[in-house]
Image (cartoon, grey):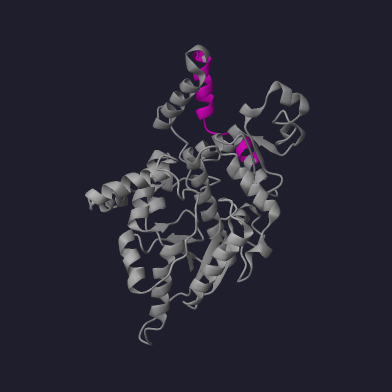
C-alpha cells in the first residue's frame, strides 16, 4: 500500500500506526509505506528549498514508523525499467538535470495554467503507479477529501473529462489493471481533517504548488475551488450535494468495455463516436471559430469528417512503436508551428531550435498523437507548440 497526498496524509498514517499498536485482537491485512513526490522543478524552487521540504517530510513520516520513499516528478518521464524512487537522503544528490530540463520544457510549452495543472496531475498519477509496480504494491491510498473531490468533479466537467468522473472521484480507480487507487477519506470534509490533525497534534508541511498565491481567475481549477469554497460558507450543504450527486454517476457500457485507453491519463478513450455526437459538434464549433467567416467553406466540413473518423491501424502501430522507444526519441510536433522558412532549415522553428522533425524519422505529428488521446488530453496537446517527452 502506498500513502500519498501531502498534509492530508497525516490522518491515514496515524490511523495505520494506531491500528497496528491497538492490540493482538486486531488483524492488519496489509502493510504500507509513504511516498513524497518533489515537484520543486515545476514551481522553480532552489535545490536548498527542495531539500528543506524533503527533510521536513522525512521527520514527519519517521514519527509513524513507516518506510518512506522519495521521488521527483521528472522521473515520470523515464523508461519503465529506470529507478523511479530512492530512500532517505539529500534530494540534491538525486536530481537528474537532463530530465528536469525536459520537464521544464514540457511544462513551459503549455501557455495556460489550466493545462499545466491538468498535465501535472496526470504525470503524478503515472509516477505513483510506476512506483507501486516497482515495489510490487497493488493499492494506493490517496487522501482526497470531499471538498477536493467536489472541486475536481466540477472542474473535470469543464475540462471535458465528464466520461471519466467515476474513475476520478469514485472510491476505487481501476483504470490500471494491476494497481488500484483508493480514496478512503472521500467522505470527510476538509475542516474535519484539519480539526483531526489539531486534536491529535499532527503537524503538517507546507508544499507550494502551481496555484499557490495565485488569483482566482488564473485557471479553471482555481476558479472552481474559489466558487465552491465561497458557496460553502453560505450554504454548508454545497460540497456534500455536489459530491453525492457525482457519486451516483456510472460509466457507460461502451466506456467500460473499451479496449483502447488514453496514452496520457490511461482512461478509456472517449473519442470513438458516431457521426452525430457532442464531440463532433464541439470540434465543428472549434474549427469554425478558428477559421473565421472568410476561410470556412464546404471543404472544411470534409476535413472535419475525416479527422473525426476512427484512426487507422497504421496510426495505432506508429504510436505504439514510439511508446516502445527511449524518452529521447519520442517527439510530438504541432504542424501549426512549421513555416516555409522552417521547412528549408528542417526545423520547427526559424531559429534552428526545436524538434527537427524533417530530419528525424521518429517524429510524429499532432494528429497522430491525438489519435491515442482522450478528448481532454487532446486539449493539453493542442496547447503545446513542440513538446519532447
Q: Identify the main secondary structure in magenta.
A: helix
Can the viewer see residue 188? no
Percent position of residue 323, x then y: 64, 47
| In-image side of 51 versus 194 (left or right) | right
Instruction: Answer whether residue 340 is visible to the viewer in this image.
Output: yes
Left or right: 230 with respect to 96?
left
Magenta stretch holds residue 17: no
What is the quadrant of residue 352 in the picture?
Answer: top right
**x then y, percent, for residue 201:** 38, 74
Between residue 19 and residue 374, name the one nearer to us: 19
Residue at point 50%, 15% (across, down): 296
- Left or right of residue 147, residue 261 in this image: right
Would residue 350 be found to the left or right of residue 317 on screen?
Answer: right
Tell me where residue 14 appears, x and y as whole percent: 41, 74
Q: Which percent across, then down, holds residue 311? A: 56, 34
- Above or below, 209 against 203 in this view is above
Quarter of the picture holding the C terminus:
top right
Residue 298 highlighted magenta (yes or no): yes
Residue drawn at point x = 38 percent, y = 45 percent: 253
Q: Quadrant of residue 227?
A: top left
Q: Is residue 297 above or below residue 316?
A: above
Residues drawn in magenta: 296-318
Q: How many numbered discs, if any?
A: 0
Amino acid at each position: 500500500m502506498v500513502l500519498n497526498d501531502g498534509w492530508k496524509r497525516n490522518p491515514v498514517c496515524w490511523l495505520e500506526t494506531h491500528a497496528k499498536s491497538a492490540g493482538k485482537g486486531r488483524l492488519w491485512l496489509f502493510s504500507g509505506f509513504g511516498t513524497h513526490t518533489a515537484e520543486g522543478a515545476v514551481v522553480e524552487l532552489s535545490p536548498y528549498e527542495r531539500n528543506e521540504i524533503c527533510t521536513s517530510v522525512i521527520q514527519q513520516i519517521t514519527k509513524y514508523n513507516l518506510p518512506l520513499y522519495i521521488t521527483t516528478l521528472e522521473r515520470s518521464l523515464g523508461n519503465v525499467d529506470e529507478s523511479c524512487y530512492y530512500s532517505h537522503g539529500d534530494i540534491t544528490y538525486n536530481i537528474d538535470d537532463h530530465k528536469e530540463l525536459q520537464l521544464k520544457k514540457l511544462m513551459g510549452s503549455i501557455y495556460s495554467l489550466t493545462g499545466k495543472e491538468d498535465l501535472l496531475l496526470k504525470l503524478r498519477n503515472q509516477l505513483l503507479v510506476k512506483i507501486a509496480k516497482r515495489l510490487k504494491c497493488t493499492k494506493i491510498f490517496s487522501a482526497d477529501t470531499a471538498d477536493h473531490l467536489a472541486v475536481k468533479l466540477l472542474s473535470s466537467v469543464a475540462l471535458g473529462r465528464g466520461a471519466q468522473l467515476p474513475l476520478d472521484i469514485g472510491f476505487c480507480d481501476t483504470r490500471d489493471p494491476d494497481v488500484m487507487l483508493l480514496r478512503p477519506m472521500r467522505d470527510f470534509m476538509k475542516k474535519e481533517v484539519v480539526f483531526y490533525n489539531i486534536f491529535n497534534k499532527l503537524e503538517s508541511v507546507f508544499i507550494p504548488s502551481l496555484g499557490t498565491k495565485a488569483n482566482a481567475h488564473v485557471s479553471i481549477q482555481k476558479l472552481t475551488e474559489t466558487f465552491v469554497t465561497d458557496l460553502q460558507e453560505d450554504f454548508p450543504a454545497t460540497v456534500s450535494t455536489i459530491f453525492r450527486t457525482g457519486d451516483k454517476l456510472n460509466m457507460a457500457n461502451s466506456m467500460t468495455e473499451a479496449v483502447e485507453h488514453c496514452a496520457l491519463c490511461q482512461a478509456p478513450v472517449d473519442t470513438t463516436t458516431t457521426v452525430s455526437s457532442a464531440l463532433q459538434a464541439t470540434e465543428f464549433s472549434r474549427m469554425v471559430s478558428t477559421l473565421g467567416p472568410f476561410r470556412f467553406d464546404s471543404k472544411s466540413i470534409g476535413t472535419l469528417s475525416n479527422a473525426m473518423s476512427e484512426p487507422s491501424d497504421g496510426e495505432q502501430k506508429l504510436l505504439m512503436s514510439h511508446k516502445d522507444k527511449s524518452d529521447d526519441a519520442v517527439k510530438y510536433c504541432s504542424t501549426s508551428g512549421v513555416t516555409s522558412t522552417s521547412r528549408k532549415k528542417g526545423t520547427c522553428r526559424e531559429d534552428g531550435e526545436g524538434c527537427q522533425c524533417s530530419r528525424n524519422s521518429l517524429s510524429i505529428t499532432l494528429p497522430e498523437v491525438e489519435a491515442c488521446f482522450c478528448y481532454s488530453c487532446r486539449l493539453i496537446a493542442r496547447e503545446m507548440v513542440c513538446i519532447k517527452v
